[in-house]
Amino acid sequence: AESHEARIRASNVMSARTTHARELFAPLGASYDRVGAVLSLGQDPLWRRFLVSRLPQDGGHVLDVATGTGLVAAELLRRGFRVTGLDQSPEMLAFARRRFGSRVDLVEGSAESLSFPDDAFEHLTVTYLLRYVDDPGATLAELARVVRSGGVVASLEFGVPRGLARPLWEVYVRGVLPLAGRALRNGWQDVGGFLGGSIREFWARYPLERQLGLWREAGIRNVEVRRLSLGGGVVMWGAKE
């Protein structure tokens, strides 16, 4: 089997998908929290709070993966957890450090090959990550590796609404988001044009049943799913075997 050290060395060579994600979000730090909330029509902060609410309130040590500017980490702190945040973007982490000072241990690194030993954390949260990795199943297994048995792994991703909400979602991501991004500039024009297609392509490749299978294969049991805001956000969570 490939050693942990070998996985870390391999992670230093970022794929085109991962590199694109890093470049896409690097310029957004100063405006990420405010604009992200507005472009999600106020839903993103609610989704993040629901994500954190899926963890048992035991004050354990949580690894917050793709922590960005620290929005989920801040909610974890508010609820009494000890938090380590990880992100591949030094620009995003710079803003998180201003937010937290020494209250959160912030680590620059790749979710695809974590620099932590097995069973290092009681729980783990991850936000908007799996669309940006080459192998979501392998990444889920790597995330689960660092969680202790019985700990909760919880994920937030954008979703594609079903039924009557789908046409409205298509109008928004095809028309409104790109226009808003061009108006905002400062990197948001790229995000506005990219986001809808990225979400749609991910759910075409990994429909819900396939994602649930990947979670089970990663050693996460009793996985539950909640679609939020007509399916615009999807939270999944389960317990490490």
Image: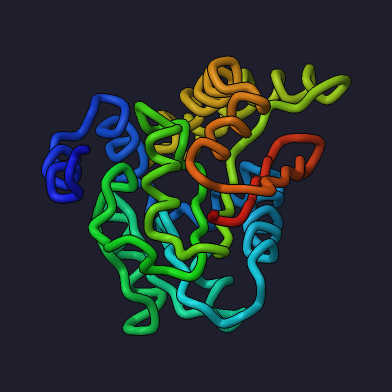
Q: Is residue 52 above or below residue 164?
A: below
Instruction: Provide residue 222's location: percent of width, then percent of height.
Output: 69, 48
Q: Is residue 42 above or below residue 188?
A: below
* Frontmost residue, 212 versus 207: 212
* Residue at (56% x, 47% y) in the render: 220
Q: How is colour applied across the structure in the image?
A: rainbow
Instruction: Provide residue 182's location: percent of width, then percent of height.
Output: 47, 29
Instruction: Name the quadrant of the N terminus.
Output: top left
Q: Is residue 220 left or right of residue 106?
A: right
* Frontmost residue, 90 versus 142: 142
* Residue at (67% x, 46% y) in the render: 223
Q: Is residue 15 above or below residue 67?
A: above
* Frontmost residue, 194 versus 219: 219
Q: Is residue 177 left or right of residue 234?
A: left
Q: Is residue 221 left or right of residue 18?
A: right
Quarter assignment of residue 7: top left
Instruction: Provide residue 79's location: percent of width, then percent of height.
Output: 62, 79
Instruction: Provide residue 54's location: percent of width, then percent of height.
Output: 68, 62
* Residue at (54% x, 54% y) in the render: 241
Quarter assignment of residue 227: top right
Quarter assignment of residue 34: bottom right
- Count of numbered labels shown in the rendering: 0
Q: Is residue 106 above or below residue 65?
A: below
* Residue at (19% x, 39% y) in the render: 2
